[in-house]
């Protein structure tokens, strides 16, 4: 790890000339904390930490670019290690060539991956490799796998979480064997899927949960799916979640963005950009939710919602790659192998498509009528497929009220 | 800027071995885009860009640590410049010694500051100097200063924004002189304070706004303050906002965290940590909002709410500096000159203080009864002031559990 120490003192930057204390971002202190794991030390290291974060990498080649990229990864890990030092989280590197045997023993197969060992589980981190994203991910991993809901206000908090898959169960007590199975199941999915439980009759009643019952909530759906045949074993719960793991509408998140992107359907993603904190973006997202609710049983449909606010560094890249303006809502189809794309024509962000129009468009995508190859020949005009959709019932713009078309999507008021 | 090019190729890191396209974080391409501003070139540069981002710095000294820190700032700026290249945003450095005359002309006074010139306005960026935070800030600055609300769904979006100061006005049209004054006023506070307008009677009715009236919303308050004596000039609006700019409860945000922190009251901040996405944190935040609403007319009170999720890299620093556990809600008093602090004793996060108990505690802080110096002598026990509050109406826990004996350490289970 020497290279790292040479490179950086002060990775995170303090504005100078501040007399105040209390907001000091950590600078890398130059101490090497990331260990090189090998067959000799690995058992001892594994025992030493509750959580061990392992970067499994190919041998570092001698060219400068690869070396720099490797160094940058080291810095991210060193800084995370420094910041999490008092939390008992260890960090190590595993060289895929030098430690091929060890890697096999640990079940590592994808070079460039970050694996986290927690007890006898291996969790892959497949998100943005930035120190803040990684630190937050690891802190989530050392929390309890199940969050207990005790009060009405906490039910509200539970209900507000709509962009994660979540489960909630009602059990007699922490000692219940069914709760224990639920807790074990939760560990399989932590921190990607949120598990909640209550031991309180009032809370259970409010959520219409029977004893030992678990409800599964797909993101952005108001109504849960009760898991059948209670009580469940750990394996039954795990299997159910795995079967229902791909939602109709999902948010792209820094902590698992690459995993989401890899989970394409037939090589494409339907991608919607909407900035939730912006009124137009909020409106578009509500319409998207409506489409998702209407099509929740279609296994062929999984829309990836991206809030540009979550990825400021990617906005310009997306605008250039997809040739779109991200100051307004967009929906399109992206081919994941070459990032070729085609986008719905939304001429005016004050006149967004209705849920029906969106559904027609989605259908055309799923049937192949709209696809990313179509526009490649004629080059200039890529709105031929959806032009007609937009014009018929959207262009009556008399500004005193244009909300007759959003009647089906104003049910959310939190 | 040569140093920078030497340092980094690939600041943002791509996990290797991905066959997919569409999520490529930018690497610094080594091209120098940040200009050194001087008396000769500044007029031309100013003319060239809609937005000019200027880092005003003291001369770089020869010691290694200062040089590295300076290089890191350069990299943040270079990467932001690269990413925003097609948005017509310029980046430059101003050396406070070499360009003292120019700095005076531009009105720069605080070395280490980042100033943004937009038309004839100068905006200071006083947030976390990280590329993503800066890029998002600058993108917000090139949007329209006023967001138009057209529909019921957009009113919902407006209502959901509760952690910013926001204003909304009802005007006849975009051509109205009163709207123009409002727009000019908005530019003074963009992007820190959000300005909305509507030209729609239905929307105005829903928000009980009369023609040419502007309502001012403090963060986390349901009820707005109507600005008196409509219609207003730009100056009247600006003055009103400045007078009401410090809210009773405010969220610490990466984009203006240092400005917020500098705005202390008598050298202290009342700081509350609550993770909004966590049920306990959500509950605590609701209680805080209640306290804020009850005390909105007290100019001596301004609580800083920190959501640890917004600052993963600071969590460990805060836990060590303040000697608290951030897995649960906390409220305390922090002395901003030395970060000395004292925290309310919340023995159990399933049994949070009530709004009344919090108000009593806040009163004790404001009267000086609770202060950061008190615990410095006896060292060990800092819960003497609030112990009695916790016991009287909160301890009916019929759950037969064990939280009697471990009053300040039981909820941490990592």
Image: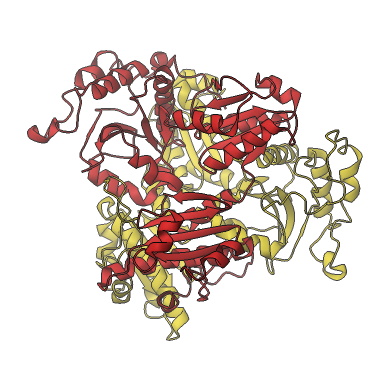
Chain colours: A red, B yellow
Tell me, yes or no, if residue B289 can be seen here.
yes
The N terminus of chain A is located in which quarter? bottom left
Residue found at x 78% / y 45%:
B348
Q: How many marks?
A: 0
Residue found at x 62% / y 47%:
B250
Q: Position of residue A359 (x, y in %)?
A: 32, 19
| Left or right: A287, with A332 as reference point | right
Q: Position of residue A55 (x, y in %)?
A: 43, 61
Q: Position of residue B196 (x, y in %)?
A: 47, 34
Residue B40, by quadrant, is bottom left
Above or below, A267 against B375 in this view is above
Residue found at x 58% / y 52%:
A119
Tell me, yes or no, if residue B126 can be seen here.
no
The C terminus of chain A is located in which quarter? top right
Q: Position of residue B274 (x, y in %)?
A: 66, 46
Residue ranking furthest to the left: A377
């Amino acid at each position: 790890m020497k290279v790292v120490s040479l490179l950086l003192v002060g990775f995170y930057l303090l504005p100078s000339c501040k007399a105040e204390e209390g907001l000091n971002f950590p600078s890398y202190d130059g101490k090497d904390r990331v260990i090189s794991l090998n067959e000799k030390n690995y058992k001892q290291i594994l025992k030493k930490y509750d959580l061990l974060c392992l970067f499994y990498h190919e041998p570092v080649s001698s060219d400068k670019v690869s070396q720099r990229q490797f160094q940058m990864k080291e810095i991210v890990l060193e800084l995370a290690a420094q910041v999490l030092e008092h939390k008992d989280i260890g960090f190590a590197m595993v060289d895929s060539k030098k430690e091929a045997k060890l890697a096999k023993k640990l079940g590592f197969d994808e070079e460039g991956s970050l694996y986290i060992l927690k007890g006898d589980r291996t969790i892959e981190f497949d998100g943005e490799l930035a120190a803040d994203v990684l630190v937050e991910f690891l802190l989530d991993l050392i929390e309890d796998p199940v969050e207990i809901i005790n009060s009405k206000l906490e039910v509200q908090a539970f209900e507000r979480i709509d962009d994660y898959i979540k489960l909630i169960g009602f059990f007699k007590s922490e000692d219940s064997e069914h709760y224990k199975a639920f807790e074990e199941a939760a560990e399989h999915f932590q921190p990607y899927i949120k598990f909640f439980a209550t031991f309180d009759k009032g809370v259970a009643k409010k959520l219409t949960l029977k004893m030992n019952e678990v409800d599964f909530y797909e993101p952005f759906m108001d109504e849960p799916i009760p898991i059948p045949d209670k009580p469940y074993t750990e394996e039954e719960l795990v299997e159910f979640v795995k079967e229902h793991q791909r939602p109709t509408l999902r948010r792209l998140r820094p902590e698992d963005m690459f995993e989401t992107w890899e989970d394409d359907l037939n090589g494409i993603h339907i991608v919607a950009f909407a900035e939730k904190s912006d009124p137009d973006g909020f409106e578009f997202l509500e319409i998207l939710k409506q489409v998702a609710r209407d099509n929740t049983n279609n296994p062929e449909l999984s829309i990836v919602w991206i809030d540009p606010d979550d990825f400021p560094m990617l906005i310009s890249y997306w605008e250039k790659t997809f040739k779109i303006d991200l100051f307004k809502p967009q929906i399109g189809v992206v081919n994941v192998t070459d990032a070729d794309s085609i986008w719905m024509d939304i001429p005016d962000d004050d006149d967004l498509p209705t849920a029906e129009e969106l559904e027609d468009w989605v259908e055309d995508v799923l049937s192949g009528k709209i696809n990313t190859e179509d526009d490649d020949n004629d080059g200039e005009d890529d709105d031929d497929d959806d032009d007609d959709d937009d014009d018929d019932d959207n262009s009556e713009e008399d500004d005193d009220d244009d909300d007759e078309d959003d009647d089906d999507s104003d049910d959310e008021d939190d």
